[in-house]
Amino acid sequence: MKIILLVLISLSLFASDVLTNYRLNGIDNIEKHMDLELTSKVYWSHYLKDTDNTFGYIESYKNILTCNKDLSTLALYSKDDNNTYKLKKKYSAFTGKEKGDKLKEGDLKTPIGVYKITKKLTKENKLDSFYGPLAFVTSYPNEYDKYRGKNGYGIWIHGLPTEKERDEFTQGCIAIDNPSIEVLDENIDVQNTLLIINGDEVKQNISKEILTSILSDLYSWRYSWLYDDIDGYLNFYAKEFIRFDGMNFDKFKKYKTRVFKKIEKKTIIFKDINVVPYPGTKDVYQITFYEDYKSDTFEFSGDKSLIVRLDESNKMKILTEK
């Protein structure tokens, strides 16, 4: 892998400087230089030039479901052969009886937010006939919901009762007619589908300038983490930060300061990155990715989630993470 990296670098406009750096300082210095380049807005602006930004920057979802509660619609967008999201189908939908964002269990509201589809339920696994032939379970409450003290559970996309009449609303779920949910099932993969719910139209055509800034900051945060810059690392956290387990910023700062003092060699790789503006907010974004982390004393591979707020200069500040 290191040989391939050096061959690619040798073909660049900066081959002479890079090779001289390698000759004098070795591969570790080259890796640090490349890690720094990943923080560059110039790199990300060029990289995003031809990417689809309909719903943000999305690497790992082929399908996007959007729910407009005001219009009572559920729309399916799928990537075409050009990796561009196109509207595939729009369904009439029932949503919660009460208007507004869900805050607590039993308030009869459909939540506003960004959610994964976690699994599919059918009569084979004892789905009640009230929910029609099948249902998709969502990840409500997500990390931002929990950060804001919202609770409740069991927010699904499901069909209509097969054995009795139903009301023109739900207790908070999204419901579409049974033929439609069967067609939806044929057109989505649970692992490849993201649900975005808003009170009105879901925001589209996200600013590439904003996405460039966020991705640059994400890799600047990673760079500070990789090279034990505790001040730079903590500067990406909001003072009101609370980790998923309840750890506030002051405790988190003390904990991370102890960890960074170990000065360990680390490998940190981000894959399947998704940056989506959070509906119902002006400057909050959900960032998710798959992280491979390895140091002398700890290893982790798994999903990572950050909720960030952009300040007045569009610098990301992390509100919560898991």
Image (cartoon, rainbow, N blue to C red):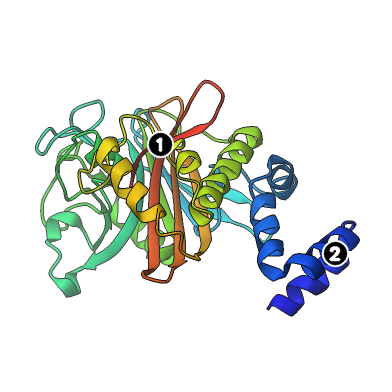
Residue 264, percent from left and from top: 46, 64
Left or right for 55, reference 164 = right
- Where 288 falls versus 198 (above or below)? below
Residue 119, percent from left and from top: 28, 64
Label 1: few (<14), some (14–19) or many (≥20) C-alpha neighbours in 10 Å: many
Q: CA distance from mark 1 to mark 2?
A: 37 Å
Count of marks, rendered view: 2
Which residue is tagged 1? 237
- Where 283 falls versus 158 (above or below)? above
Q: Can residue 187 be seen in the rendering of this structure?
A: no
Residue 217, quarter of picture: top right
Q: Amino acid at mark 2?
A: Thr
Image quadrant for the N terminus?
Answer: bottom right
Residue 280, quarter of picture: top left
Could you tell me which residue is drawn at 52 percent across and 20 percent down?
312
- Where 59 falls versus 94 (above or below)? below
Left or right for 168, reference 105 = right
Which residue is tagged 2? 20
Left or right for 220, reference 24 = left
Of marks 1 and 2, the one in the foreground = 2
Residue 91, percent from left and from top: 40, 45
| SS under mark 2 | helix
Label 2: few (<14), some (14–19) or many (≥20) C-alpha neighbours in 10 Å: few
- Where 133 falls versus 287 (above or below)? below
Could you tell me which residue is drawn at 55 percent across and 28 percent down?
314
Q: Mark 1 vs mark 2: which is more N-terminal?
A: 2
Left or right for 148, reference 55 = left
Choose between 254 and 150: the one closer to the eye: 254
Q: Can residue 120 be seen in the rendering of this structure?
A: yes
Q: Amino acid at mark 1?
A: Tyr
| SS under mark 1 | loop
- Asked whether the residues under the numbered discs 1 and 2 touch, taking CB atoms below 8 Å apart as contact, a structural biologist would say no
